[in-house]
Image (tube, grey):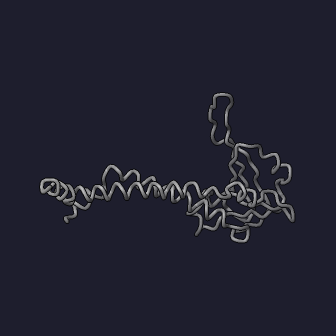
Amino acid sequence: MTKSRLFQLIFIKETGILIIAIIVLWLAIGLLVDFNYSVENLKGYYGSIVRLDSILTITKDKPLYKEITKELQLKLDSYSKVFTLSTTRDFGYITSKIYVGDYVTIYTKPKLWGIFGLKKGSDINHLTKAEDIIIDYKDYKTSIAGLYLLPLLFAIILFFVYITKLRKRIWWEFGGFERYQEKIKVQ
């Protein structure tokens, strides 16, 4: 089998199914990683709040209303990184509890594991002020509990479809059809 023949066999029109299956599998792995994290696995940043802003990032026109995605931005005095939290809800439950000058601890995903999961490295996963928990990571874990099973099942189905189609193509391309025709002629 030559290289060009191998590339023709691998890069067929069904390769799109394989690419989608890999993306969906990555999503399932990300959800599973996020679900198995705990606050102890997150990286903590401690400092005084020097900036507390809320900005609009996305506005989508829905049939009956506008969906507005807002982003809360926190900057601590001891770090140059701006920490963010995006949501379609109001930030009143957060901004009523923390103010500029308060000392808080912000927890984010570690950089090494940041490639997995749905949140970025600067996203606020857990936020505490003294002993008060302002943003609880357990709430996020509860919202994604068991959700990784759907994309995992979908990815397995897509892999099965791809392998089935690839096996048919291999059979067809490498003499399976000719052998089938010879058996029909003999009978």
Q: Position of residue 92 (x, y in %)?
A: 81, 45
Q: Position of residue 20 (x, y in %)?
A: 45, 52
Q: Is residue 143 left or right of residue 31?
A: right
Q: Is residue 91 above or below residue 160?
A: above
Question: In the image as oriented, which residue stretches furthest toward the bottom?
Answer: 40
Q: Position of residue 60 (x, y in %)?
A: 62, 35
Q: Quadrant of the C terminus?
A: bottom left
Q: Count the numbered circles shown.
A: 0
Quadrant housing residue 31: bottom right
Q: Position of residue 124 (x, y in %)?
A: 70, 58
Q: Quadrant of the N terminus?
A: bottom left
Quadrant housing residue 56: top right
Q: Residue at x 83, y 60 (%)?
A: 133
Q: Residue at x 71, y 51 (%)?
A: 73
Q: Is residue 112 above or below residue 64?
A: below
131 vs 152, nearest the viewer: 152
150 vs 79, nearest the viewer: 150
Q: Is residue 22 left or right of residue 146?
A: left
Q: Is residue 18 left or right of residue 113?
A: left
Question: In the image as oriented, which residue stretches furthest toward the front?
Answer: 187
Question: In the image as oriented, which residue stretches furthest toward the top?
Answer: 64
